Image (cartoon, rainbow, N blue to C red):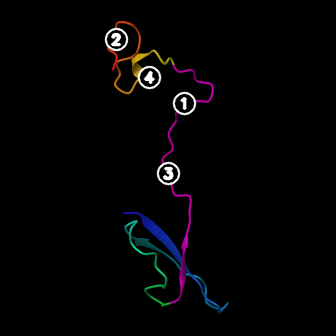
Amino acid sequence: MPTYVYETISMDSDIKPRRFEVFQRMSDDTLVTDPESGLPVIRVISGGSGILAEGLKKNTIVDKLSPAATACGCGTKSGFHKH
């Protein structure tokens, strides 16, 4: 289940916003109030951590006839099995 970040909204400038995380299904309704204070909340959109991995560089040339370039690994050169 994804973790969503919410922040309280207050019309009183003396009350600091509170951020908290909630584990919810994607199909669950978005929270409208803070379970602790009852204040209205908004869901905070963040970039997330993601996965950083090195991939193909822009100038990398892929040999499309190579067995490694096909999903099944069979290649398209003559002598290799074609689907």
Badge 3 density bin: few <14, some 14–19, many ≥20, Cα 10 Å: few
What is the spatial separation of the Cα atoms under label 3 and label 1, in whole angstroms?
18 Å
What is the spatial separation of the Cα atoms under label 2 and label 1, in whole angstroms?
25 Å
Image location of residue 37, percent across then percent down = 48, 90
Choose between 40 and 15: the one closer to the eye. 40
Q: The disc labelled 3 sits on which kind of residue?
A: Gly
Q: Which residue is mark 2?
A: 80
Q: Residue at x 56, y 66 (%)?
A: 45
What is the spatial separation of the Cα atoms under label 1 and label 4, in whole angstroms?
13 Å
Q: Which residues are magenta?
A: 39-62
Label ID, residue 56: 1
Which quadrant of the figure contains the N terminus? bottom left
Q: Earlier in the sequence, mark 1 or mark 4?
A: 1
Tag in front: 2 or 1:
2
What is the spatial separation of the Cα atoms under label 2 and label 3, in whole angstroms?
37 Å
Q: Earlier in the sequence, mark 4 or mark 3?
A: 3
Q: Secondary structure at mark 2?
A: loop
Q: The disc labelled 2 sits on which kind of residue?
A: Phe
Magenta run includes residue 13: no
Magenta run includes residue 60: yes
Badge 2 density bin: few <14, some 14–19, many ≥20, Cα 10 Å: few
Q: Residue at x 40, y 65 (%)?
A: 26
Badge 1 density bin: few <14, some 14–19, many ≥20, Cα 10 Å: few
Asked whether, in this view, residue 46 is left or right of residue 26, the answer is right
Q: Which residue is mark 4?
A: 69
Q: Residue at x 44, y 88 (%)?
A: 36
In the displayed structure, would residue 78 be above or below residue 43? above
Q: Earlier in the sequence, mark 2 or mark 3?
A: 3
Q: Residue at x 38, y 68 (%)?
A: 27
Q: The disc labelled 1 sits on which kind of residue?
A: Leu
What is the spatial separation of the Cα atoms under label 4 and label 2, in whole angstroms?
13 Å
Q: Which residue is mark 3?
A: 50
